Amino acid sequence: MRRAGQVVREVLELVRGLVKPGATTLDLEKAAEARIKELGAKPAFKGYHGFPCVLCTSVNSEVVHGIPSAKRVLKEGDIVSVDCGAIVDGYFGDSAITVPVGQKIAPDTARLLKVTEDSLHKAIAVVKPGATLGDIGAAVQTVVEAEGFSVVRDFVGHGIGSNMHEEPQVPNFGEAGRGMKLRAGMVIAIEPMVNVGKPDVKVLKDGWTAVTNDGSMSAHFEHTVAVTDTGARILTE
Ligand code: MG
Ligand code: MG
């Protein structure tokens, strides 16, 4: 799983470097697909329930599951969430980043990216044997709501292993001390999705792209994290 995680990391860092005004989300997809192949891995998303691409690219008010397109041209001040999954020898890695396009990002949007990434790291910091899923959700929710932003409820993190989505679900909200206890050897994908406005989302007519109901900006960061005897080990770092 570490090897799959490293493929995902490499692809995401490649894509991060390609995000700029004038690039299309299909440009990102093509580069990612070629790199996954070069690294001898398989894409986890393409063909998953019929999803057509190796990346999800979700721009501005798109929360998750945006489909790369030659028509989607990135502009100065946009943000783009890039989610990637890869398979190595039957094991999965899954990670996401949200990247600013150009230099002139609005202050609130910059804060959204920082808070969402912080909330992921705060959640990872509570991971250890005996900690609960509620501890993870509460860690995310506390950081996000302290900044006046909201946590998406309709999509959650997940167990991951020889399938991309395994039990348990890993919500980004909850109460400390509640829910399943973590044990060494479990691997989970923690993936806060955070909106500037309200938490509600809807899915567009393409059947995939989830957007904020109020049109506010949304960010997404994700790592695949193993529970070890001494705490979290991030496999997609
Ligand atoms: Mg993902
Ligand atoms: Mg995931």
Image (cartoon, rainbow, N blue to C red):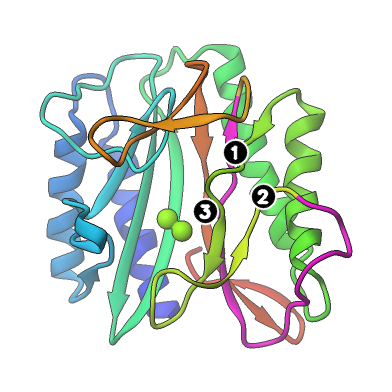
Residue with the mark numbered 2: 172
Residue with the mark numbered 1: 152
Residue at x 69% of width, y 87% of height: 184
Q: Is residue 228 above or below residue 208?
A: below
Residue 111 position within the rendered picture, expressed as x and y whole percent measured from the top left: 63, 24
Asked if the residue under mark 1 is in contact with the one under mark 2, i.e. CB atoms within 8 Å, the reply is: yes
Residues drawn in magenta? 174-195
The secondary structure type at the circle numbered 1 is loop
The secondary structure type at the circle numbered 2 is loop
Per the model, the C-alpha gap separating discs 3 and 1 is 14 Å
Q: Earlier in the sequence, mark 2 or mark 3?
A: 2
Could you say which quadrant of the image residue 69 lies in? top left
Q: Which mark is residue 11?
A: none
Residue with the mark numbered 3: 222
Per the model, the C-alpha gap separating discs 2 and 3 is 11 Å
In this picture, residue 120 sits left or right of residue 9: right
Q: Is residue 45 above or below residue 91?
A: above
Q: Is residue 48 above or below residue 17?
A: below
- Classified by dominant secondary structure, the portion drawn in magenta counts as loop
Q: Earlier in the sequence, mark 3 or mark 1?
A: 1
